[in-house]
Amino acid sequence: WIPSTTGSNLVTNGTFDTDASGWATFNCSLSVASGQCTMAASGDNPYMSQSMPTVVGKLYVVSCDVVSDSMTGNNFVKVGSASGSGSIGSLVTAVGTNKFCFIATGTTTYITVSGGTGVSGQTIVVDNISCYEAGVQIALNQTGLDGQSNACSLLTATATDGTVLQTITASAAAACSG
């Protein structure tokens, strides 16, 4: 389940309208044509990355279109606390639109597209890289529907996403009714 999003895109130049400005690279070069970015490997574990502002504890939705891929091994879209890192979350990509959610652990989060083992000259073409705040936020360990403090996740909805869901984890002695 991928929630709806709100606010503005936190990724700078994720649509590659004219160039690849705003993206740092490691063991690769970037070129842009027709609004798509080609990452060409020049060494092992190539990646392109940038920082974005986040709020600790907020839920975010990442999206990346992979147009084509000739890299050896798995490619990832990932987020972390440093450039190239996937310490917060990652997704093995496939050609098409790739999406996942993460909860920010710091005020700066890095988004990275990384290419497999990166044999020199191999490429991955990407477009429409974005990160938006989720329209539904998660608050952990809140009071449950029964008024008791539970180990639960409470999802709160915004006006644009009117569904509220709750998952409750009860001990063996607890009785649930509904």
Image (cartoon, rainbow, N blue to C red):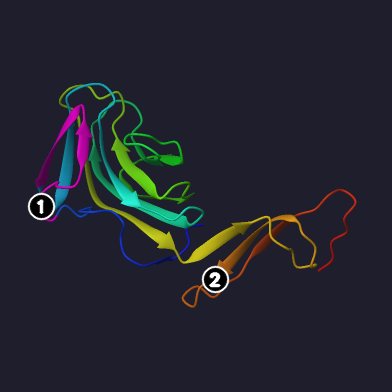
Name the residue nearer the viewer: 151 or 42. Answer: 151
Residue 27 highlighted magenta (yes or no): yes
User: In the image as oriented, which residue stretches furthest toward the front?
Assistant: 107
The residue sitting at 48% across, 52% down in the picture is 56
In contact (CB < 8 Å): disc 1 and disc 2: no
Residue 147 image point, x, y percent = 79, 67
The residue sitting at 14% across, 46% down in the picture is 20
The residue sitting at 20% across, 43% down in the picture is 23
The residue sitting at 48% across, 62% down in the picture is 3
In the image, residue 160 sits, relative to residue 25, either above or below, namely below
Which mark, by number, is residue 157? 2
Which mark, by number, is residue 106? none
Q: Disc 2 marks which amino acid?
A: Ala
**In which quadrant of the rendered view does residue 78 lie?**
top left
Of the residues under marks 1 and 2, which one precedes in the sequence? Answer: 1
Q: Name the residue under label 1.
A: 34
User: In the image as oriented, which residue stretches furthest toward the right?
Assistant: 173
Residue 34 highlighted magenta (yes or no): no
Q: Disc 1 marks which amino acid?
A: Ser
- Give the crowd class for mark 2: few <14, some 14-19, many >=20 residues within 10 Å: some
Residue 19 image point, x, y percent = 10, 49
Give, as a single range, the part of the protein colored magenta. Answer: 17-32
- Residue 124 seen in this snapshot: no
Q: Is residue 47 left or right of residue 167?
A: left
Residue 125 image point, x, y percent = 20, 42
Q: For numbered disc 1, what is the local secondary structure?
A: loop
Q: In this view, does 119 lie to the left or right of 83?
A: left
Q: For numbered disc 2, what is the local secondary structure?
A: strand
Q: How far apart are marks 1 and 2 (CA)?
A: 38 Å
